[in-house]
């Protein structure tokens, strides 16, 4: 008894308690819902059976029925385009801005701080504003494009099936860029300056310095950013609700919005859960890639 | 000593308990009521009046958000914590009624001196009905009709007192009014991928002789073809596909659309925002003499079947119904009552518009009623959007919707 007590106070037991508390917390708040969600995807769940655990078990019927729906593959493809497009845009512009502010011109840190405003704004507000900007007849974006001679006829960003998804991507890139920039700025400032001095002595030009020092040293930051970006884009819901509602004809519908639509508009919770499970598998796969890519990290 | 002290404590506790239970007996019956009405809307104000009567029933109000009404109510019902009374959006009524989550009020209504079925418009009443029994009482109602800009009519050489009567006339009028050089579209409506899209399309299908069960019928296909024509010929903004009714009407108020299809909730905003003369007309029909129809919106009162005080809850509903006569004056909402004239407001434009909506209300039909309405509605929205974006022919899109609806209804 005393040995156990001592171990808890200072020893293996203490370690287990330390690990156990957050683990229990995680299990209760993330693990259980996840398991519940997986369970629901194998059941027929509607409004009236929502409160009970025992519901008709339907095996993989939900999955089969889901993939029989004609809109399933287009929506999954849209999700992929949305994720890749958003992360790509956010990261490239964010990195560009981070490098720009890294040159440390007067007022750089002030300006960098101001950029964060976009990240602070609630998604629904951002969505409502972009909704106006992207509006076909009177939108500001169309006005600028027309005045600068880039287009002759208005583009109906929200309502033209070939643009609607990109309309949300544009808004999402705007929303997430500053967050990318801040994290990348932190990563940049962590690179020891002497590396560049040494490279300078060796006669490396800016391009070479970027590819051989900056990029490799930023590897873990970039990995983390892309992993976070994946999570944030797969969570992105407000912009869809505010700008296109997934329309027209599902051309801008993505998995997360569809899951909500099925669960909370059509009250088909089983099928909504099924999509969530598919998304979870996808995220776990991406997380595995992320863990692998940062495992052999080189620490400066 | 110990025992004695204990016994004193027990005695005390018993006294307290009996006191509490005695008080509870003397207390009023407590009812809970959920609705999404804000402080300027009927529910909280009617409750205040009701409670002020001190007739032994006190109602506690809880406001819920639009998106949460159904899911909150359902969760509460399945865990036994449902309110006594709820205001439910009419297309969702059947979902609850068909599962007996709502109380059958037929017997109580039969003996009621205040709530009489024959006093209500048929559409709203039908939405509260399931299997020939009443599971609720219409709370308020609305419908859609055509608003048109009289100034633009005159400018285009049209008679401002002769709004279009048929679909063909509507398209032709829209074509005449359409003026891209001045940023004016012929007409605005809403084909959004949510309930609003169904709300606006279904009346057209019904005027064509179809119902949601025969959504690929000839009339519905023609209706969707007319919509598609309006889109293809750019007589309406392509953003009709993603814009709400409220936002579509805003373009009418700004003079950027010469006509708009929307409901009476627009009147007050139009009176302040629209800087031109406007009028209202009944929804145009497929051809002269064809049957009329319109959409039907707004909420119904219902009592949950596991309420412990159904009698008292019904008394509350009777009180609410007794206040229908002043509903428009007090809250700007139309009561679902055919027997109550809406009193003149003193504003001729407003009164004319209200008269149109009351006339249109006679033809309003509920969506469904079906317990699977949200899924049926989704199938219809998909068809509308597939056809209007040109990805499917109207007939094919509606055939697909009909097949989906058939499998949903089983």
Image: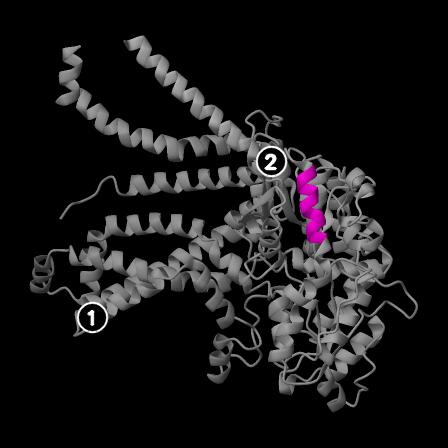
Residue B155 image offset from top left, x and y in percent: 73, 90
A262 or B21, which is in the foreground?
Answer: B21
SS class, disc 1? helix
Q: Kindly identify the residue that appears in the image at 16 percent across and 58 percent down.
A: A189
- The front one of B275 and B248 is B275
Whether residue A245 is situated above or below residue B116 in the rendered picture: below
Horizontally, residue A181 falls left or right of residue B147, namely left
Colouring chosen for the image of the structure: one colour
Residue B198 lies left or right of residue A5; in this view the side is right
List the residue tagged with mark 2.
B77
Q: Is residue B339 placed above or below A41 in the rendered structure?
A: below
Quadrant in the picture for the N terminus of chain A: top left
The residue that disc 1 covers is A108
Query: Can see residue B91?
Result: no
Which quadrant of the view contains residue B180? bottom right
The answer to whether B125 appears left or right of B312 in the picture is right
Magenta highlight range:
B311-321
Q: What is the CA distance from the residue labelled 2 to the residue labelled 1?
A: 57 Å
Kindly state the secondary structure of the residue where label 2 is placed.
helix
| Residue at x 64% of width, y 68% of height | B240
Residue B214 in picture, x, y percent from top left: 83, 50
Q: Residues within 10 Å of mark 1 (few under 14, many from 20)?
A: some
Q: Position of residue B350 (x, y in %)?
A: 71, 76
Contact (Cβ within 8 Å) of mark 2 with mark 1: no
Q: Which subunit holds the residue at mark 2?
A: B
């Amino acid at each position: 008894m005393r040995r156990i007590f001592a171990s808890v106070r200072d020893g293996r037991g203490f370690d287990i308690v330390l690990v156990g508390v957050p683990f229990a917390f995680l299990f209760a708040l993330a693990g259980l819902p996840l398991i519940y969600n997986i369970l629901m995807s194998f059941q027929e769940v509607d409004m009236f059976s929502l409160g009970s655990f025992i519901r008709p078990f339907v095996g993989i019927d939900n999955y089969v029925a889901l993939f029989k729906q004609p809109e399933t593959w287009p929506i999954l493809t849209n999700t992929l385009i949305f994720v890749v497009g958003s992360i790509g845009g956010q990261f490239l512009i964010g990195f560009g801005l981070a490098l720009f502010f890294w040159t440390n011109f007067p007022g750089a840190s002030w300006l960098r701080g101001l950029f964060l405003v976009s990240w602070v704004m609630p998604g629904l507000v951002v969505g409502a504003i972009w909704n106006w900007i992207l509006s076909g007849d009177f939108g500001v974006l169309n006005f600028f494009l027309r005045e600068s001679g880039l287009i002759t006829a208005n583009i109906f960003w929200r309502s033209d099936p070939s643009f609607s998804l990109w309309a949300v991507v544009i808004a999402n890139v705007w929303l997430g860029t500053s967050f990318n920039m801040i994290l990348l700025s932190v990563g940049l400032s962590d690179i020891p300056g002497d590396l560049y001095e040494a490279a300078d002595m060796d006669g490396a030009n800016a391009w070479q310095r970027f590819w051989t020092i900056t990029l490799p040293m930023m590897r873990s930051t970039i990995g983390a950013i892309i992993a976070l970006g994946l999570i944030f884009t797969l969570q992105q819901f407000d912009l869809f609700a505010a700008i296109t509602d997934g329309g027209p004809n599902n051309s801008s519908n993505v998995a997360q919005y569809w899951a909500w639509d099925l669960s909370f508009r059509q009250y088909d919770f089983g099928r909504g859960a099924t999509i969530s499970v598919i998304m979870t598998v996808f995220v776990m796969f991406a997380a595995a890639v992320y863990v692998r890519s940062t495992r052999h990290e080189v620490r400066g | 000593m110990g025992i004695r002290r204990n016994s004193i404590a027990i005695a005390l506790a018993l006294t307290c308990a009996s006191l509490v239970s005695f008080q509870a007996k003397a207390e009023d019956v407590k009812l809970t009521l959920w609705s999404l009405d804000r402080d300027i809307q009927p529910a909280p104000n009617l409750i205040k009046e009701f409670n002020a009567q001190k007739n032994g029933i006190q109602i506690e109000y809880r406001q819920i958000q639009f998106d949460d009404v159904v899911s909150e109510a359902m969760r509460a019902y399945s865990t036994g914590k449902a309110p006594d009374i709820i205001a439910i959006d009419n297309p969702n009524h059947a979902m609850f009624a068909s599962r007996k989550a709502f109380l059958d009020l037929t017997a109580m209504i039969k003996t009621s001196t205040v709530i009489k079925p024959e006093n209500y418009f048929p559409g709203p009443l039908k939405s509260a009905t399931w299997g020939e029994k009443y599971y609720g009482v219409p709370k308020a109602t609305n419908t859609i009709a055509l608003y048109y800009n009289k100034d633009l009519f005159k400018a285009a050489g049209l008679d401002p007192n002769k709004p279009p009567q048929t679909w063909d006339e509507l398209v032709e009028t829209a074509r005449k009014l359409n003026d891209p050089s001045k940023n004016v579209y012929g007409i605005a409506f809403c084909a959004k991928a949510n309930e609003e899209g169904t709300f606006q399309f279904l009346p057209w299908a019904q005027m064509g002789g179809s119902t949601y069960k025969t959504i690929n019928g000839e009339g519905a296909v023609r209706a969707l073809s007319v919509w598609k024509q309006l889109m293809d010929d750019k007589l309406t903004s392509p953003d009709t596909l993603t814009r709400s009714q409220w936002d579509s009407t805003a373009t009418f108020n700004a003079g950027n659309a010469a006509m708009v299809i929307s409901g009476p909730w627009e009147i007050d905003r139009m009176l302040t925002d629209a800087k031109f003369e406007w009028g209202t007309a009944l929804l145009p029909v497929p051809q002269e003499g064809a049957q009329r129809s319109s959409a039907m919106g707004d909420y119904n009162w219902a009592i949950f079947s596991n309420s412990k005080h159904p009698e008292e809850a019904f008394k509350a509903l009777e009180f609410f119904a007794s206040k229908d006569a002043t509903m428009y004056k007090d809250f700007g909402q139309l009561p679902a009552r055919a027997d109550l004239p809406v009193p003149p407001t003193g504003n001729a434009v407003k009164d004319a518009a209200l008269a149109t909506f009351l006339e249109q209300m006679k033809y309003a039909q509920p969506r469904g009623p079906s317990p699977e309405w949200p899924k049926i509605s989704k199938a219809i929205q998909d068809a509308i959007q597939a056809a209007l974006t040109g990805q499917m022919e109207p007939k094919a899109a509606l055939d697909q919707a009909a097949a989906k609806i058939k499998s949903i209804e089983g």
